[in-house]
Image (cartoon, grey):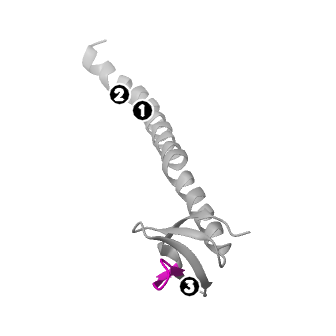
Amino acid sequence: MELTALLPLMQQGAGGGSMTTTFITFALVIAIFYFLIIRPQNKKKKETQAMLSTLSKGDKVASIGGIRGIVQSVKDDSVVVKVDDETKLEFNKSAISNVLEKSS
């Protein structure tokens, strides 16, 4: 038997294994993206939502712009922050990056 006669048989055998390997590789890439990117991002989003929902008057907060102050009032989607004795700023809740100290 010549080599050219065996070539189609060799290609068929390699093709089936190659397809399975491709699917396994694709599944591994999806799993890696899920565990390294999507899952931590969702976890951080839930933590941020929980922090914003428990925001209350008297909490010391920092904004995403670096402004620090004390919460004077909390509305549905905004927060009034007292920066010094006379200055009050109103922020969207999403602009609050973290709570530095909870009021007692």
- Going by the numbered disc 2, the residue's amino acid type is Gln
Label 2, label 1: how far apart the Cα atoms are: 10 Å
Is the C terminus in the top left, top right, bottom left or bottom right quadrant?
A: bottom right
* Along the line of sight, the residue nearer the viewer: 58 or 52: 58
Above/below status of 78 relative to 5: below
Residue with the mark numbered 3: 77
Label 3, label 1: how far apart the Cα atoms are: 53 Å
Q: What is the secondary structure assignment of the residue under circle 2?
A: helix
Give residue 65's quadrant in the image. bottom left
Tell me whether the residue at label 2 lies in contact with that at label 1, contact meaning CB atoms closer than 8 angstroms.
no
Left or right of 37? Residue 75 is right
Left or right of 3? Residue 10 is right
Left or right of 7? Residue 74 is right
Residue with the mark numbered 1: 18
Q: Does the magenta portion include 89?
A: yes
Q: Could you say which disc has been placed on residue 11 in the image? A: 2
* Along the line of sight, the residue nearer the viewer: 33 or 53: 53
Tell me whether the residue at label 3 lies in contact with that at label 2, contact meaning CB atoms closer than 8 angstroms.
no
Number of residue marks: 3
- The x, y position of residue 68, in whole percent, is 48, 69
Task: Name the residue: 65% across, 67% down.
Answer: 50
Range covered by the magenta-colored residues = 81-92
* Along the line of sight, the residue nearer the viewer: 24 or 10: 24
- Going by the numbered disc 1, the residue's amino acid type is Ser
Tell me whether the residue at label 3 lies in contact with that at label 1, contact meaning CB atoms closer than 8 angstroms.
no
